Image (tube, helix red, strand yellow):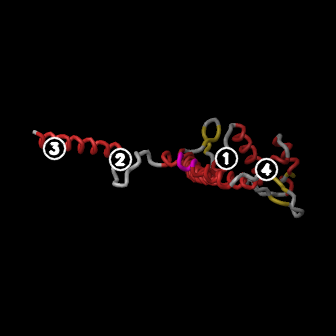
Amino acid sequence: MSKDSAALLTVRDAAERLGVTPRTLKYYEERGLVSPTRSEGRYRLYDEEDLKRFARILRLRSLGFSLHGITEMLKRPLETVEGGHRFSTESLQQIRDAIAQQVDALDARIETMRRELREAQKLRAELSPDLDYLERRLAGENADTLLAQRRNAQAKAAPTATTGTPPTTPTGTTPAKRSGKSRAAATAMAKASTDKSS
């Protein structure tokens, strides 16, 4: 339909025809769902095709579809079928693929944000004792006492900061293994002593 002046409606008249507020129409225009013509004075003007598009948007919104989903739906034509209009299987697949791509992109973004959150929480945990120390020093507490407290806190936290393996000795053996070797050595020495005395 050509947009002749007789067929064009102002935003107020179009909103009245559709049973919505002018702000609603402007909102969907701002989201890029509808592109009305403009008068020489830059006023929005809507034709019957615009009204049909608005009506379709409003119906899809009332059914709970998201604006992103509606945007993808509006890119594909409806097919005339008995009792109304429907999307073809090909169009449905295209809409599905487009929305799935958006969901995948959002999943990747969410994972990135979670990783950044974990890193931020770790850094905060590292900085908190430093801030606590400085605030207590500024409050007049003794530096040597505070430093001793930090050393004690670090000593207590050290075992839990490892991978869970028992602490090793300078020779690289664990305490359990070392004690086992000590017992074996003591048994051998006792046996040698018995052999000499017999």
The amino acid sitting under disc 4 is Tyr
Q: Amino acid at mark 2?
A: Thr
Q: Earlier in the sequence, mark 4 or mark 3?
A: 4
Mark 1 neighbour class, 10 Å CA radius: few under 14, some 14 to 19, many 20 or more: some
User: Marks 2 and 1: CB-CB under 8 Å?
Assistant: no
User: Looking at the rendered structure, which numbered label has been put on residue 46?
Assistant: none
Q: Is residue 78 left or right of residue 30?
A: left
Magenta stretch, main secondary structure class: helix
Mark 4 → mark 3, Cα distance in angstroms: 96 Å
Q: Residues within 10 Å of mark 4 (few under 14, many from 20)?
A: few
- Mark 1 lies on residue: 70
The stretch in magenta equals: 152-156
Q: Determine whether label 4 and label 3 are within 8 Å by CB.
A: no
Query: Residue flagged by tag 3: what amino acid is it?
Result: Ala
Distance from disc 2 to disc 3, alpha carbons, whole Å, reads 27 Å
In front of the other: 167 or 68: 167
Q: Furthest residue to the front?
A: 197
On the image, the x and y values in percent for residue 150 come to 60, 51
Judge by depth and name the residue closer to the eye, 122 or 33. 122
Mark seen at residue 192: 3
